[in-house]
Image (cartoon, rainbow, N blue to C red):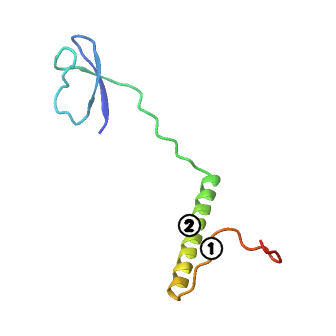
């Protein structure tokens, strides 16, 4: 629901009310009925990122999530066969003991 700004005709106090209020708004300062609605600038919409960079980062995120799902499914399948899953971390270096 939109919020409208009003100004009291009796005491000139400014206040805001929701649009769903039926009838004339009542001034919170003096209690007068029939405040005048003011026309103020609307609030700007939130920034919506656009462009190739956003689409690229969304695609990379989708690829990372798909790879993670594949790794989890692979580990679950190995556990079901009775194998131990590979430990997470650095892969062993070829020809080295550490």
Q: Nearer the viewer, residue 2 or 62?
A: 62
Q: CB of mark 1 within 8 Å of CB of mark 2?
A: no
Name the quarter where the N terminus is drawn.
Answer: top left
Instruction: Give the crowd class for mark 2: few <14, some 14-19, many >=20 residues within 10 Å.
Output: few
Q: How many marks?
A: 2
28 relative position to 3: left or right:
left
Give the residue at mark 1.
Answer: 87
Residue at the bottom extreme, as displayed: 81
Q: Position of residue 4 (x, y in %)?
A: 30, 29
For the residue labelled by badge 2, is the local secondary structure a helix, a strand or a loop?
Answer: helix
Q: Position of residue 31 (x, y in %)?
A: 16, 17
Please say if 40 is above or below 73.
above
Residue at the top extreme, as displayed: 11
Q: Nearer the viewer, residue 66 or 33?
A: 66
Please say if 88 is above or below 18.
below
Give the residue at mark 2.
Answer: 65
Instruction: Give the crowd class for mark 1: few <14, some 14-19, many >=20 residues within 10 Å.
Output: few
42 relative position to 69: left or right:
left
What residue is drawn where x is 35% and y is 25%? 39
What residue is drawn where x is 55% and y is 79%? 75
Q: Position of residue 25 (x, y in %)?
A: 20, 25
Please say if 69 is above or below 20.
below
* Residue 34: image tag: none
Name the quarter where the C terminus is drawn.
Answer: bottom right
Q: Nearer the viewer, residue 49 or 40?
A: 49
Q: Quadrant of residue 21?
A: top left
What residue is drawn where x is 62% and y is 77%? 86
For the residue labelled by badge 1, is the local secondary structure a helix, a strand or a loop?
Answer: loop
- Decide which of tag 1 and tag 2 comes sooner along the chain: 2
> Could you give the CA–CA distance between mark 1 and mark 2, rounded to whole angstroms?
19 Å
What residue is drawn where x is 31% and y is 36%? 2
Please say if 71 is above or below 31.
below
């Amino acid at each position: 629901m939109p919020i409208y700004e009003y100004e009291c005709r009796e005491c000139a106090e400014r206040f805001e009310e929701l649009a769903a209020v039926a009838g004339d708004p009542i001034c919170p300062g003096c209690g007068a009925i029939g405040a005048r609605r003011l026309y103020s600038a609307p609030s700007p919409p939130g920034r919506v990122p656009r462009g190739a960079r956003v689409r690229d980062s969304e695609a990379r995120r989708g690829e990372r999530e798909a790879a993670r799902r594949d790794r989890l499914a692979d580990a679950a399948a190995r556990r079901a066969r009775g194998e131990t899953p590979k430990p997470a971390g650095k892969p062993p270096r070829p020809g080295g003991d550490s």
